[in-house]
């Protein structure tokens, strides 16, 4: 019948909709059942769009059936098993199902059937447009999300530019601080030199005063002798001697006055240099604080820009991967749907032009055309959505060392100019990572009793070691300390630094110091280096040594030697004066740590 023929046609469209086929053609049990009789192999590439076409075709047939009844129902039941076999067939069959061709070869192709085929073809055209539009929409959605990476990069570049600007500010502050420390070093040398010259002028004044005192005593003694012998018996020669003594006394008085004026001039000069040096040091300490604050701002800006971008990028990347994975699945489904519906459309086009019943016989040319419809691959390249990988993440700016950390101090202050030191860091960076707390120590079992070792032997007078008892390494200069045992009031026996004044006039003292290294091996000589930095304690005034006759630091004889006088020349070797020295012993000379 005509309606049975229409049923066969729309079932051609229902290969992906088993439930609809069962609901419209059967007794109604398949619409609510998943029994073995109704089941068909599930296909991953079943497509919703083709299902909508099937529904439209199914409703058209149902409306026609309800309006005119179904007097041909028995004919429909006759084809029921054929219909179910076709519906249960594979979705993506590469050849026309034989049962379909067999069934279609017996039906009548009335104008009603042809009209239905044409109407269905018109419906499919809009479906193809929808499939293509869906593919384009997915591509645009992917590209829109991809463009978001560019927005992130643009914002990141702005943040990096801001961080770079602050880093440049920190570099400028670093230069200002270093230039200030260089000026401070120059003033430090002038300060120490003026203190040194002050000590020399004081010594000269004291020597002149001593000479004046001696001449005064000689004149007084001579005058007393004249008085005792009677002035009337003074010979011409005696008178001349007396006058000569008086003139010599007047000369040393003038010499003392000159030395005293020089001392006062040096005292003013030293005080002025000290004042200028202290002012510069205060300014450099302030410059250091400003530099550390600028580094803190640069580090915070650098870290914030990197953290913000990394978080946003990772979130965008995760979203992009989810979207592209879903798009890939939908693209595969659309290709399968497109190919299936194009085959259906191909068959419908053949049916729409039929005029003679039985033209679909197995051996007819039309039957062969339908087979070719199923064998043709109707893939469309426009449905392909090529893979578009997410862009690689941008590179963050290098992080500077945070102020007030050991790494920062080593990097910035380890090579400050001679005589300058960095003040303790006080900058507080809010974004600075909090160091991990130090884990509680693991309890250590109580050790077995051990024998107390014998105490180390007391150093001998004039023995030398590296500063703080550190090891002496061959080829490396060190700050020497000497074991002092004397009778200066207020000073206890112990390790004291060596004062550079007069000691640094030659290398003789350095050679003796190397020979007197505690535990030293291979030590025969050495050279001296002036450093002029300050000590925290008073230094021993060894003075100048004679390489020809001196063998001990405490008994050097070449000038200004005062082993027991820490206050010589106005205390120029006391703590805070720039009198430090370094000694480098001969190659191969070593000494162990003195702990």
Image: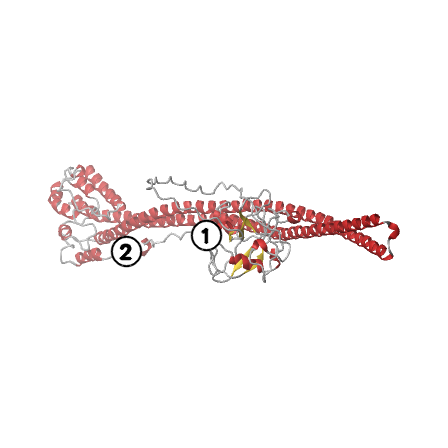
10 Å neighbourhood of mark 1: few (<14), some, or many (≥20)? some
Residue 160 in sight here = no
Q: Position of residue 560 (x, y in %)?
A: 64, 54
Q: State the mark number for residue 14.
A: none
Which of the pair 120/586 is nearer the observer? 586
Mark 2 surroundings within 10 Å by alpha-carbon count, few (fewer than 14), some (14 through 19), many (20 or more): some
Pointer 1 residue: 593
Q: Earlier in the sequence, mark 1 or mark 2?
A: 2
Q: Could you tell whether 98 is left or right of 180 in the image?
A: left
Is residue 451 shown left or right of residue 170? left
Q: Is residue 570 visible?
A: yes
Q: In this orientation, which residue lies closer to the viewer: 424 or 436? A: 424
Look at the numbered disc 1 and give the secondary structure of its residue.
Answer: loop
Image coordinates of residue 217 in percent, x first then y, are 76, 49
Position of 464 with respect to 282 (left or right) is: left
Identify the image's colour scheme: rainbow, by chain, secondary structure or one colour: secondary structure
Please state if 50 lies on the left or on the right of 102 as rendered: right
Residue under the point 49% across and 60% down? 523
Give the quadrant of the N terminus. top left
Residue pointed to by mark 2: 379
Q: Position of residue 585 (x, y in %)?
A: 52, 60
């Amino acid at each position: 019948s005509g309606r049975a023929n229409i049923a066969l046609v729309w079932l051609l469209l229902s290969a992906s909709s088993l439930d609809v086929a069962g609901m419209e053609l059967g007794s109604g049990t398949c619409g609510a059942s998943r029994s073995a009789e109704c089941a068909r192999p599930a296909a991953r590439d079943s497509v919703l769009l083709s299902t909508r076409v099937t529904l439209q075709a199914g409703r058209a047939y149902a409306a026609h059936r309800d309006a005119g009844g179904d007097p041909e129902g028995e004919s429909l039941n006759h084809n029921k098993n054929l219909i179910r076999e076709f519906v249960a067939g594979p979705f993506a069959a590469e050849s026309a199902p034989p049962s379909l061709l067999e069934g279609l070869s017996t039906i009548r192709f009335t104008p009603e059937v042809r009209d239905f085929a044409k109407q269905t073809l018109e419906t499919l055209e809009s479906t193809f447009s929808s499939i293509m539009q869906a593919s384009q929409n997915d591509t645009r959605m992917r590209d829109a999300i991809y463009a978001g990476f560019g927005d992130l990069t643009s914002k990141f570049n702005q943040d990096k530019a801001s961080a770079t600007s602050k880093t440049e500010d920190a570099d400028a502050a670093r230069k200002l601080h270093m230039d200030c420390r260089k000026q401070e070093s120059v003033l430090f040398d002038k300060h120490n030199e003026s203190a040194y010259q002050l000590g020399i002028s004081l010594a000269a004044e004291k020597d002149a005063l001593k000479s004046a005192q001696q001449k005064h005593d000689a004149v007084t003694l001579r005058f007393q002798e004249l008085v005792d012998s009677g002035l009337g018996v003074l010979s011409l020669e005696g008178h001349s001697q007396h006058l000569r003594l008086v003139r010599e006394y007047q000369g040393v008085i003038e010499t003392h006055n000159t030395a005293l004026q020089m001392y006062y001039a040096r005292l003013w000069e030293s005080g002025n240099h000290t004042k200028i040096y202290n002012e510069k040091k205060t300014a450099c300490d302030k410059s250091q604080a400003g530099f550390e604050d600028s580094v803190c701002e640069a580090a915070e800006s650098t870290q914030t820009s990197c953290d913000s971008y990394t978080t946003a990028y990772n979130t965008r990347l995760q979203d992009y991967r989810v979207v592209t994975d879903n798009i890939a699945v939908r693209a595969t489904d659309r290709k399968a749907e497109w190919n299936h519906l194009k085959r259906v459309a191909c068959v419908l086009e053949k049916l729409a032009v039929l005029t003679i019943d039985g033209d679909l016989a197995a051996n007819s040319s039309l039957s062969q055309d339908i087979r070719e419809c199923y064998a043709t691959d109707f893939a469309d390249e426009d449905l392909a959505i090529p893979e578009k990988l997410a862009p690689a993440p941008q590179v963050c700016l290098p992080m500077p060392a945070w102020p007030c950390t050991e790494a920062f101090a080593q990097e910035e202050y380890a090579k400050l100019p001679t005589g300058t030191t960095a003040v303790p860091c006080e900058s507080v960076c809010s974004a600075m990572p909090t160091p991990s707390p130090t884990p509680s120590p693991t309890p250590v079992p109580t050790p077995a009793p051990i024998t107390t070792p014998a105490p180390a032997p007391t150093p001998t007078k004039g023995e030398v070691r590296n500063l703080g008892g550190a090891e002496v390494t061959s080829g490396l200069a060190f700050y020497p300390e000497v074991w002092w045992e004397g009778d200066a009031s207020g000073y206890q026996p112990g390790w004291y630094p060596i004062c550079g004044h007069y000691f640094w006039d030659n290398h003789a003292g350095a050679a003796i110091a190397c020979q007197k290294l505690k535990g030293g091996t291979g030590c025969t000589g050495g050279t001296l280096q002036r450093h002029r930095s300050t000590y925290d304690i008073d230094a021993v005034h060894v003075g100048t040594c004679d390489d020809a006759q001196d063998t001990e630091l405490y008994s050097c004889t070449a000038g200004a030697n005062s082993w027991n006088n820490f206050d010589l020349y106005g205390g120029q070797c006391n703590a805070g004066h720039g009198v430090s020295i370094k000694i480098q012993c001969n190659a191969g000379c070593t000494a162990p740590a003195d702990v």
